């Protein structure tokens, strides 16, 4: 940049130096902005291409002469270059999309490029009166990728790519809806997935098949720094949403399983996190109560039992906030010794226990298991649950160095339990004789609970502070209903500090 005006030359030297210094400081900023693809649109036009079902792959990919297939734009060597926007018109596309360049925006639209198709995750579904009724995956509203066979194929493949923006797509009938990740644990992807919806994913005759949206894969693929929002996931036979990596964010995710006649067809993990500093918020998961698999809800686990030559991951610093789990065998769960210092806040777990019958119903709340330690659950509500809080360890911790560990140092703070068949269940599932750990329940309220403590394993390290343990109204509990199980006598008065027990028949001496 040259400054040769007479006014500049005649300026006092001190002012000229200030201006020159400012301009020189600005030059590298401008140069960087011009070549940074994220900021390119502010300084030069972004390459833009178009795909439509009535197009032709021999066309130039313009709005007037679009390409016919999405792969022509994002996989073909003569397609859209890195840094491009590719608009895809509503319609049905029978292909497996493999994006082979970085910094691509793949955006679906209804009629005019840039318009906003419906966000299906926001559609009213009302699952409380039986199975949900979902909005149609209408190819007239946004592009529909249909693989035609839910036992094979990948709808959208982002592996080993960076900076991909995928918006407004419906995906159904593949083994995987959308996947990303790299073998490099430090690979930063920075993807944005918005209004990407998947349905009927995975082979329901296979033992474990079907991932709706998978950012990474435990021990072998890692996905970092990406965001998923406004996603509807229906009947992914193995896993709904998986985040295997660090610094990812998921919000307004809806995961439903309405099949479930067999374990193979039931969703196993609804939202699964293995990594650090991820956030999952404002999301909703729903399981058909009669499903053959009990269902892992919002889950944090390490990969000790699935190591495949990769690094051992210790999930920490993850935050789950404002989430709802309905009819889950495990609503909010931490498992394995590598899981520590994570936070669940303002969540709600619903079951279908009616409050008076002998049937436990479906749906549990907080689950601590397999050595997970020093995690906090704050202001979590559990309504009509079978078991409000479950502390259970299993042989799955055996992949770590011996001895097997109990879940310990976890805190449940300001929990609200409203009508539960069992308040606290200390299960001996593969943990017979092992202590349940030194977990603490603080400032919580149990109301209308039929069986308060069922201790099937030693529980002497447990602590309870400033908590109300309320039984059924009326005549209250018999002595056996307050504390039952093989280790009932280890539920001791000395473990309780400033606690009250309305509508409970306490043991003699309490």
Image (spheres, rainbow, N blue to C red):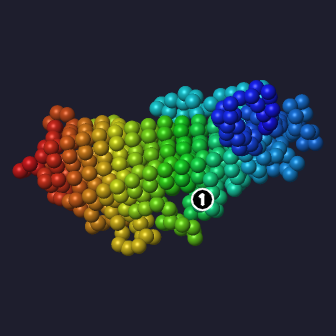
Question: How many numbered badges does the structure rendering display?
Answer: 1
Residue located at (77% from left, 50% from top):
101
Which residue ends up furthest to the left in the rendered image? 509
Which residue ends up furthest to the right in the rendered image? 58
For residue 452, say whether it is visible. yes
Residue located at (34% from left, 39% from top):
379
Which residue ends up furthest to the bottom in the rendered image? 402
Q: Which secondary structure lies at badge 1?
A: loop
Residue, disc 1: 186
x, y (%) of residue 416? Answer: 30, 38
Q: Is 376 left or right of 396, judged from the image as shown?
A: left
Q: Is 507 left or right of 66, judged from the image as shown?
A: left
Residue located at (12% from left, 46% from top):
506
x, y (%) of residue 491? Answer: 18, 55
Foreground residue among 435 and 218: 218
Foreground residue among 475 and 175: 175
Q: Quadrant of residue 335?
A: bottom left
x, y (%) of residue 83? Answer: 76, 43
Q: Is 14 left or right of 140, judged from the image as shown?
A: left
Q: Quadrant of residue 141?
A: top right
153 lies above or below 421:
below
Foreground residue among 211 and 429: 211
Residue located at (63% from left, 47% from top):
190
Quadrant housing the N terminus? top right
Dot 1, crowdedness within 10 Å: few (<14), some or many (≥20)?
A: few
For residue 360, say whether it is visible. no
Q: Quadrant of residue 462?
A: bottom left
x, y (%) of residue 412? Answer: 31, 47
């Amino acid at each position: 940049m040259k400054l040769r005006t007479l006014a500049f030359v005649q300026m006092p030297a001190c002012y000229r130096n200030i201006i020159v210094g400012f301009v020189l400081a600005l030059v590298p900023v401008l140069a960087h902005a011009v070549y940074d693809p994220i900021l390119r649109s502010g300084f030069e036009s972004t390459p833009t291409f178009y795909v439509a079902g009535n197009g032709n792959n021999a066309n130039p990919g313009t709005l007037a002469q679009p390409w016919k297939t999405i792969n022509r734009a994002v996989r073909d060597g003569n397609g859209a270059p890195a840094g491009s926007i590719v608009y895809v018109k509503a319609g049905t596309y029978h292909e497996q999309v493999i994006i082979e360049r970085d910094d691509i925006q793949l955006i679906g639209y209804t009629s005019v490029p840039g318009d906003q198709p419906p966000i299906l995750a926001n559609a009213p579904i009302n699952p409380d009166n039986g199975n949900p009724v979902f909005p149609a995956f209408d190819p007239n509203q946004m592009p529909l990728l249909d693989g035609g066979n839910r036992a094979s194929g990948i709808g959208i493949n982002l592996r080993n790519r960076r900076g991909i923006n995928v918006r407004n797509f419906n995906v159904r009938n593949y083994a995987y809806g959308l996947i990303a990740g790299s073998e490099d644990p430090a690979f930063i992807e920075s993807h944005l997935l918005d209004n990407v919806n998947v349905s009927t994913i995975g082979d329901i005759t296979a033992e474990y098949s079907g991932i709706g949206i998978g950012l990474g894969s435990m021990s072998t693929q890692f996905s970092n720094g990406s965001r998923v929002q406004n996603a509807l996931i229906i009947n992914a036979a193995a896993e709904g949403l998986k985040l295997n990596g660090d610094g990812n964010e998921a919000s307004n995710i809806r995961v439903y399983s309405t099949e479930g006649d067999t374990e193979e067809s039931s969703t196993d993990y609804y939202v699964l996190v293995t990594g650090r500093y991820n956030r999952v918020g404002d999301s909703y998961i729903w399981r058909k109560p009669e499903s053959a698999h009990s269902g892992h809800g919002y889950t944090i686990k390490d990969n000790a039992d699935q190591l495949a030559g990769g690094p051992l991951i210790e999930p920490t610093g993850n935050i789950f906030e404002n989430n709802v789990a309905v009819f889950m065998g495990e609503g909010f769960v931490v498992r394995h010794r590598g899981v520590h210092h994570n936070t669940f806040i303002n969540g709600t777990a619903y079951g279908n226990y009616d409050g008076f019958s002998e049937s436990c119903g479906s749906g549990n709340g907080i689950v601590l298991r397999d050595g997970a330690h020093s995690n906090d659950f704050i202001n979590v509500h559990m309504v009509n649950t079978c078991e409000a809080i479950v502390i259970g360890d299993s042989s799955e911790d055996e992949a770590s160095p011996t001895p097997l560990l109990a879940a310990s140092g976890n805190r449940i703070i300001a929990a609200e339990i409203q009508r539960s068949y069992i308040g606290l269940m200390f299960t001996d599932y593969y943990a017979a004789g092992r202590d349940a750990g030194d977990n603490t329940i603080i400032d919580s309220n149990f109301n209308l609970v039929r069986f308060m403590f069922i201790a099937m394993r030693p529980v002497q390290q447990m602590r309870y502070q400033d908590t109300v343990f309320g039984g059924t109204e009326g005549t209250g509990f018999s002595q056996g209903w307050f504390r039952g199980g093989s280790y009932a006598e280890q539920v001791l008065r000395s473990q309780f500090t400033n606690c009250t027990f309305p509508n409970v028949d306490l043991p003699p001496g309490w």
